[in-house]
Image (cartoon, grey):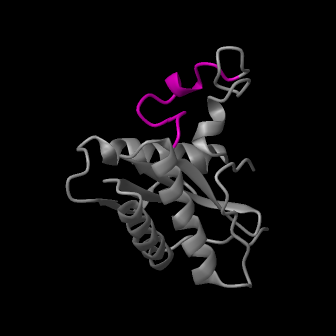
């Protein structure tokens, strides 16, 4: 039997707050979504003025990152698994509307275990990345030194 870590609402709120602050800093109107290890939404926020399409896109990015254990932008990079020459070309068509293969989704990895995902939609790629990594860094700060959270953009577990 294995003991697992579970992401809870308190941690998701910390991540949302930091992500919102980062979005304001980079001047982007974002939707931020935090999902658990099953891909279900724990918390989501659409900033005032953010696109109405943001919630669905952010949710798909978070679902993909957490469920497939890699940052969503890694799917489409040259030679990536979802590129036209990759072994997973067309993977996004398997789960229509739920699988995103572009910038803005990051798995939440704590002590080597994927506990969820964060999805960000509304800015350009650099802005979405800054907001997503701010959420991960906030989780690390909140959890302290007893836990290790991967906080860089290129995550593949």
Q: Classify residue 115 by image quadrant.
A: bottom right
Q: What residue is at 51 percent from the left and 47 percent from the top?
A: 126
Q: Is residue 149 above or below residue 96?
A: below
Q: Can residue 22 be seen here? A: yes
Position in image of residue 117 (x %, y %)? 55, 55
Total of numbered circles in the picture?
Answer: 0
Position in image of residue 143 (x %, y %)? 62, 82
Q: Is residue 16 above or below residue 41?
A: below
Is residue 95 part of the magenta span, yes or no? yes
Please tell me whether the stretch drawn in magenta is mainly helix, strand or loop: loop
Q: Is residue 97 above or below residue 9?
A: above
* Left or right of 19 on screen, residue 115: right
Q: What residue is at 55 percent from the left and 70 percent from the top?
A: 7
Position in image of residue 97 (x %, y %)? 41, 32
Magenta part of the chain: 88-103
Q: What residue is at 66 percent from the left and 63 percent from the top?
A: 151
Q: Classify residue 90 by image quadrant.
A: top right
Is residue 153 part of the magenta span, yes or no? no
Judged from this view, the residue extending furthest toward the left is: 49
- Closest to the observer: 31 or 95? 31
Quadrant containing the N terminus is: bottom right
Q: Can residue 62 be seen here? A: no
Position in image of residue 52 (x %, y %)? 23, 44
Q: Is residue 63 above or below residue 150?
A: above
Q: What residue is at 71 percent from the left and 28 percent from the top?
A: 80
């Amino acid at each position: 039997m294995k003991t697992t870590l579970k992401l809870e609402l308190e941690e998701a709120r910390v991540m949302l707050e930091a992500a919102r602050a980062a979005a304001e800093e980079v001047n982007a109107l974002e939707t931020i979504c935090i999902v658990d290890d099953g891909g279900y939404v724990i918390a989501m926020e659409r900033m005032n003025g953010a696109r109405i399409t943001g919630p669905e896109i952010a949710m798909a990015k978070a679902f993909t990152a957490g469920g497939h254990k890699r940052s969503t932008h890694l799917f489409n990079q040259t030679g990536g698994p979802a590129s036209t020459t990759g072994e997973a070309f067309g993977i996004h068509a398997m789960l229509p509307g739920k699988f995103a293969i572009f910038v803005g989704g990051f798995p939440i990895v704590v002590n080597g275990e994927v506990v969820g995902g964060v999805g960000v939609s509304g800015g350009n790629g650099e802005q979405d990345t800054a907001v997503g990594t701010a959420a991960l860094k906030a989780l690390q700060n909140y959890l302290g030194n007893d836990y290790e959270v991967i906080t860089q953009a290129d995550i593949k577990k």
